[in-house]
Amino acid sequence: MSDVALPLAETHERLARDLPSHEREGQIFWRLRTRLCAAHLRSLMAEARLRTSLVIGLSLFFWFGLFALFYGGFEFVVQHVDMPGAPYHAKTMHFVFSLFFLSLQVMLVFSSAIILYSGLYPSGETAYLLTLPTRDERLVDYRFQEALFFSSWGFFLLASPMLMAYGFVVAAPWYYFAYLPVLLASFAYIPCAVGAILCLVLIDRLPRLRRVVLGLAALAVIAIAYRSIWRTLDVSNLEALGRTWFTETYRKFRFMRDEWLPSIWLSHALIDAARRSNNNPKDLPWFESGKYMVVLVSNALFLRIVVGALGKRLFRSSYWGLHARPARQPKRAWGKLDSFVMKLLWMFPRSTRVLIVKDLRQFRRDPVQWSQFLIFFGLLLLYFANVDRFRQHRDNPDVLTWVNIVSFLNLAVVGLILSTFTTRFIYPLISLEGRRFWILSRLPIKRDTILWGKFFFAAGGSWLSCSVLVAVSDLMLDVAWSVVALHQFVCLLLCIGLAGMAVGLGAIMPDFREQSPSKIAAGFGGTLNLVLSALYILLVVLMTALPCHFYLLARKAEAATPTTLIQPRLLNFWMLLGLAGSTVLAVIVTVVPLRRGLRAFRRLEV
Amino acid sequence: MLRFEHVSRTYGSRLAVDDLDLEIKAGELFALLGHNGAGKTTTIKMLVGLLRPNRGSITVGAYDAVASPREVSRLIGYVPDQPFLYDKLSAREFLHFVADMYGLSATVSGEAVAREIERFRLTEFADRLAESYSHGMRQRTVFAAAMIHDPPVLVVDEPMVGLDPQSIKLVKDLMQQYVRSGRTVLMSTHTLGVAEQIADRVGVMKNGKLIFNGPVSELSEAVKGTDGSLEAMYLAMMEQLEGPEPTAE
């Protein structure tokens, strides 16, 4: 066999030489992308027309709603602050734009890093592509394009109506609208590329960093961020929304107007492009704006090169490092928690308790679930912990109005975030169980017990976290104890209703062919669950918020109500009616889907 | 053609592959056997560029697997234990994509796709989206993709899982034909009967170590007192190393 060695070596060299060039490889991946997108669109139009129409319709509704909102806001600025081109107008708009874009910039960094990580490292597609003669930098670029798209579509959905509205309000010249797509695209690219760089470097270093060091670093970052936010917002001794308050707030936010930030380049570019020339031949707004656009585009292109270079240098080694980590073993301490939960749920049958503990274990061992939970609820907690701006002005009826509105809005936000979780993680539980259903169906337990176990797990788990969040919000806003109690009751109704709906609909419309929970959640049943959940939250919160709002106003400010229906003597009645209505609604959305789900689950053949 | 020199790989403190020394020549079909967790898949993953050895080197032809993964992957056709396909591509589109990635020209690519579709009997479903395929259909498509560029080395991890008897026969014949034309096959399998029928040489791994490397006939000399089948010899060898398995009684 060794006599074939020389010709073989030559053949191998020729084969390796024939591999596609950079440009050819780019074309191949582009064709792959367009084929996949076209197939996805075809299947969406054929199989999920309702969902697609719903998503497009809601997006358009959202876009036009934002446009109207921003239009009104910018008209206010033009009428009450100053005209475009005037220093006060520019100063105000700089504040608005830089705050808005800086916030989105930070979010884009994190979302791009997280999406790129899940696309590059734990993905079966990446593992397959690595076994083909794909260049590492091409693979990173291919995945980065996805991360860029999925992390920035929300940014475009928010920023485009705002900037279009601004352009129309200030009657911006044509080049403002022509610059917009380039400005937004190049701006979004920069934080996304920074996120990609962070992802590659962090994963490359991760196996070498001790977990304790990482934990301490994360804690330090959170502590610094928390302290910065606290100090920035701490203007409690000043008159809320007054001149001094504005001046002080403007001063405290000066960090976001640093000239090295891409958000400030974008703000400069937008404000310059939107104003008219002041008849000075040397004043060329299109040129001034264009200079910032060039800065944004060149930085985006530079970062593209950096991502490519790091991809080539770090990706494969970081992939190797990550996939050579030892398999994790369950920690003993968590076993104690499981025993504690078993004891805590003493009132349930043992089989239900065992199923609840099984779902709890799966939750805490799935980083996708607990990390999303931590991020969303952590951000909410951070916001709620800083929402006590109105405390010292509680005697003012105007402020009181805001306190009540904000406290109920916070409750609604908690419910809406919870509904995304129940849709993403609870709704697919039965579908995912289908693949292992033969194990459960062989056990000596009733099928109803499985469904009840999931319901109690979802309702109990969500109530524990949501009630804490709502309590923090109420304590920071210093609302009356009666309102705290009301909010806790509504929170309980929301948790039970959302859990019942997700578990019930999940059992009525299971998808046993799909293995990915996110795809199950994105199907028709998941979308229906999300829409119904949002409606339920809005109805419950409105039914309890409105009577409570008028009741408190009437009591605290002794406001005379002009209409016969909203008279103080009738407010108690409206309060009770709202509470009763919410409770009835909660019973319906819990019992109806669960009963139907139980019936469907009993008849299930897998 | 394939050479593992003192290759070791750890996962944390666990040694998955321990000082592996192995050479597989052109025109040879080598079957890697061993219990679950013996180190077979880790060995294959290091060869195809999904893992890096902690120590030692792996060469395919003239290329080092760590230094030149792209060139090495051109020489290898890889069939993983869990087949990957794009759900929203048909088998034909997928094969064209893979052919393009290996640098085949449009004409050669078209011929190769037609050849593999016919060879693996994919015609019936070649233009349907892969999301509707059964496990066996997926496995056959992945086999076709691994052979689209006519590689000098075929690396197969658990080739028979999910295949119907007709497809198993097809794959066995194909691999034998492949080595007869001077190319190399490295196969990891638990299907000892297939290994016995078609392998020129078998390697038995245990706890990351290659404890046997040679033709089946040599194994029968090493393990006496069996009926001579590879299955019996393999089990006897493991029993000698571990002590007897507990009986049903």
Image (cartoon, rainbow, N blue to C red):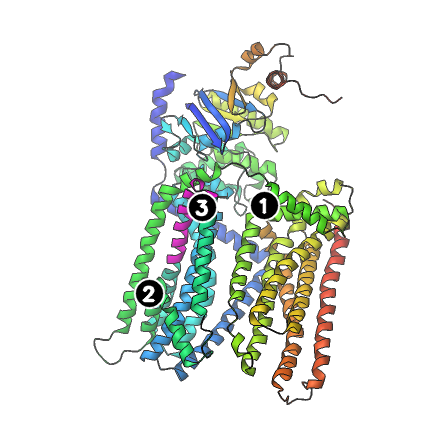
Please state the horizontal and vertical placement of residue A561, each as a whole percent of the image: 64, 88
CA gap between label 2 and label 1 equals: 41 Å
Q: Is residue A471 above or below residue B194?
A: below
Marks counted in the figure total: 3
Badge 1: few (under 14), some or many (20 or more) residues near its Cα, within 10 Å?
few
Q: Position of residue B79 (x, y in %)?
A: 51, 33
- Front residue of this view, candidates A193 and A92: A92
Residue denoted by label 2: A258
Q: Which chain's residue wears label 3?
A: A
Of residues B192 and A34, the one nearer the viewer is B192
Under circle 2, the secondary element is: loop
Question: Which residue is identified by label 3?
Answer: A213
- What x and y, as percent, mark residue A212? 47, 45
Q: Which residues are magenta?
A: A190-211
User: Which sits earlier in the primary sequence, circle 2 or circle 3?
Assistant: 3
Q: Which residue is mark 1?
A: A365
Q: Residue at x 56, y 54 (%)?
A: A43
The disc, 1 or 3, on the residue closer to the chain's N-terminal end is 3
In the rendered image, which quarter is residue A479 located in? bottom right
Foreground label between 1 and 3: 3
Q: Amino acid at mark 2?
A: Asp
Task: Identify whether A20 is placed above or below B184.
Answer: below
